[in-house]
Image (tube, grey):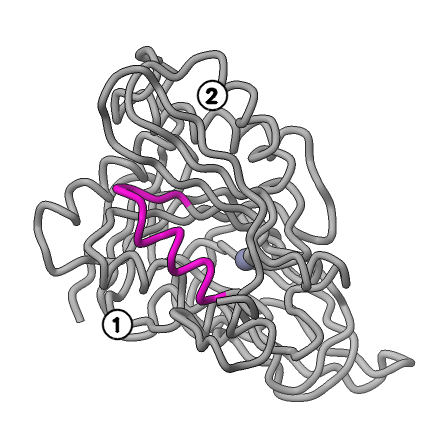
Amino acid sequence: MSNIPSIPHRTIVAPNEGPHLLITGGVHGDEWEPMAAARRLISLFEKSIERGKVTIAPVVNEAAFARAWRTAEDDVDLARVCPGNAEGSITHRTAVALTSLIQSADCYIDLHTAGTRLSMLSMSGYCLHRDANILDAQRRMARAFNLPIVWGTSPNLHGRSLSVARDANVPAIYTELGGGGMCSAQGTDDYVNGCLNVAADLGLIPARSPENRVKYIVEDDRDQSGHLQIQHPASVAGYFEPAVTLGDVVRKGDTLGAILDPLGENPVAVNCLDDGLVLMLRACPSVQKGDALCCLLPITEPGEVRIRG
Ligand SMILES: [Zn+2]
């Protein structure tokens, strides 16, 4: 196992029996709030844990972090190659180490952001697990995390940290927010509080009763729901100028924005392919053909929607 990188982490053990919660940040190397929140959580759990144990890994993908980029030098996405390969390149080997952390846990929170090139509304998500008890545990964790959007998506996505958790029957959620290369203090606070809310709900720390912030709940089991990097692909390369902002409600055919050439003389319109809420938007204006420009959540007013494919 010597060629498997060791992921820096701390495990905090309570005096009383209880579940083992794993919290990871930095699966992608350009996502800052998860790293900042996870670091803060180490000392907060040291002071407050009463039952069970928590393992916290603020920067899973150190090779990507060193480049301030989503991926390491092999350009392989860690969230596409889990459970990894001990004989593969650095990202495949990091995936092996991450898989072993996930398999050792009883429940799992994987913190992400929209990174440097995208921006996103704050959300927690899970896969629509075929085991009803695990699905219920995931729904409960996602709601307890207390971000405005809760999104249950296809159980058929592979290569993710959550795919490993699914296959190991470990209840798991992931979270997203922010992006655009920033590290927001509010986002970091939301992640600290979200993890503490879930830990309290699991009985690891004393009960908390935050005001409910959950506004939209969507469950969508269509294949590829939850795959952010494929929606509204750019038809040409150029400068993407959005006409909408995060949180806007749009209708099929509405203008999402345009892709411009250097003089702006030949704009290529980008139109909505569906009705929905603008969940993710390209933050970096420089786009290549095929880059995802926008992801719509299939809901148009606060409440709950369930879509069965
Ligand atoms: Zn990520």
Q: Which residue is mark 1?
A: 156
| Label 1 Cα neighbours within 10 Å, binned few <14 / some 14-19 / many ≥20 | some
**Which of the two discs, 2 and 1, sits closer to the camera?**
2
- Residue at point 45%, 46% (across, down): 175
On whether ligand 1 comes within 8 Å of the CB at mark 2, the answer is: no
From the viewer's side, name the closer residue of 33 and 123: 33
Taking the view exactly as shown, the residue that stands out farthest to the right is 263
Task: Residue 98: give x, y in percent of width and height.
Answer: 45, 58
Q: Main secondary structure of the magenta part?
A: helix
| Cα separation between marks 2 and 1 | 34 Å
Q: Amino acid at mark 2?
A: Phe
User: Is residue 293 in view from this perspective?
Assistant: yes
Total labels drawn = 2
Compared to residue 14, the image places residue 102 above or below, namely: below
User: Counting other residues with Cα less than 10 Å from the Cα at mark 2, is it few (<14), some (14-19), or many (20 or more)?
Assistant: many
- Residue on which the image places disc 2: 45
Q: Is residue 216 left or right of residue 273?
A: left
Name the secondary structure under disc 1. Answer: loop
| Highlighted range, magenta | 95-109
Is residue 55 located in the magenta-colored stretch of the structure? no
Q: Residue at x 39, y 44 (%)?
A: 124
- 108 left or right of 182 in image: left
Task: Tell me the SS state at disc 2.
Answer: helix
262, 254: nearer the viewer: 262
Q: Look at 68% across and 56% down and name the residue there.
A: 30
Q: Quadrant of the C terminus?
A: bottom left
Ligand 1 occupies quarter: bottom right
**Front-most of 221 and 250?**
221
- Residue 265, percent from left and from top: 85, 84
Q: Is residue 102 highlighted in magenta? A: yes
